[in-house]
Image: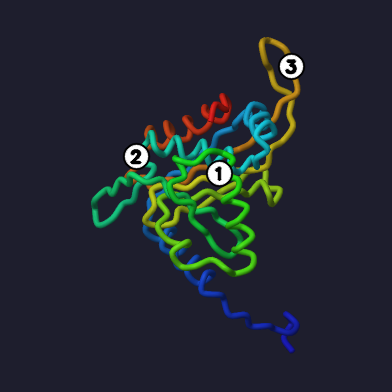
Amino acid sequence: MSSKGEVEIVEPTPAERALARRVAEARATVPDLELGVVVEMSAALSLASETRVSITSVVLRACALALAEHPRANAAYRDGRFELYSSVNIALALEHSSPVIFDAADKSPPELSAEVSELTQRAERGELRPPELSGATFTYADQGALGIDHPSIVITPPQAAAVAGGTVRAVPTVRDGAIVPGHEMVLALAADNRILNGTQAGAFIARVKQLLEVARL
């Protein structure tokens, strides 16, 4: 027996193999740009409570609307050219798979919430079909569910961008000149710098932040 104790060899699942290839490809070939913003989430939390939906669905709705407004974020870099997509298809990064929410910009927070719940449950049971795992134009990871305050994410090539959300934390905030209870969440953006320059990437994540803070979704 080695100093490491008994060694168990575990073969990765097909999904884990695919993820490993994508991450290696992204790190080796994509000149990525990373940005982070702090979002005041009180309005978004109120919307989630009023409509009885998950906060993830509210963030997904904001991302989807911002993607529709910023086509280069809902795109890909292929063979020296830009592919801009008319459909906003968001991959939901889960532990072992990334099911896709198709036409996310056309769905309300309640519709997104129901779909996220269904896809997550089916992913846990291993019931997702190959067509439900392909065709994404963007990726979102809810790392707040893992208790992560400061999230990070790697692009899934050839997608132009991906966003991760952290935990929603109770914090004091200034409103109308007074210190009042508030809530904040960090959003992390990873973007392919070949298709999104710093200004374009900043405009996209700033729009997501604005939509969440206004919460008219």
Amino acid type of the residue that numbered disc 1 sits on in the rendered structure: Glu
Asked where in the image residue 25 lies, by quadrant, the reply is bottom left
Asked where in the image residue 187 lies, by quadrant, the reply is top right
Residue depicted at 66% across the width and 46% down the height: 144
Q: Residues within 10 Å of mark 2 (few under 14, many from 20)?
A: some
Query: Viewer-proximal residue, 28 or 52?
Result: 52
Q: Secondary structure at mark 2?
A: helix
Quadrant that contains the N terminus: bottom right
Q: Farthest residue to the left: give it.
A: 80
Residue depicted at 72% across the width and 12% down the height: 178
* Disc 2 target residue: 71
Amino acid type of the residue that numbered disc 2 sits on in the rendered structure: Pro
Q: Earlier in the sequence, mark 1 or mark 2?
A: 2
Q: Farthest residue to the top: give it.
A: 177
Between label 2 and label 3, give the one nearer the viewer: 2
Q: Earlier in the sequence, mark 3 or mark 1?
A: 1
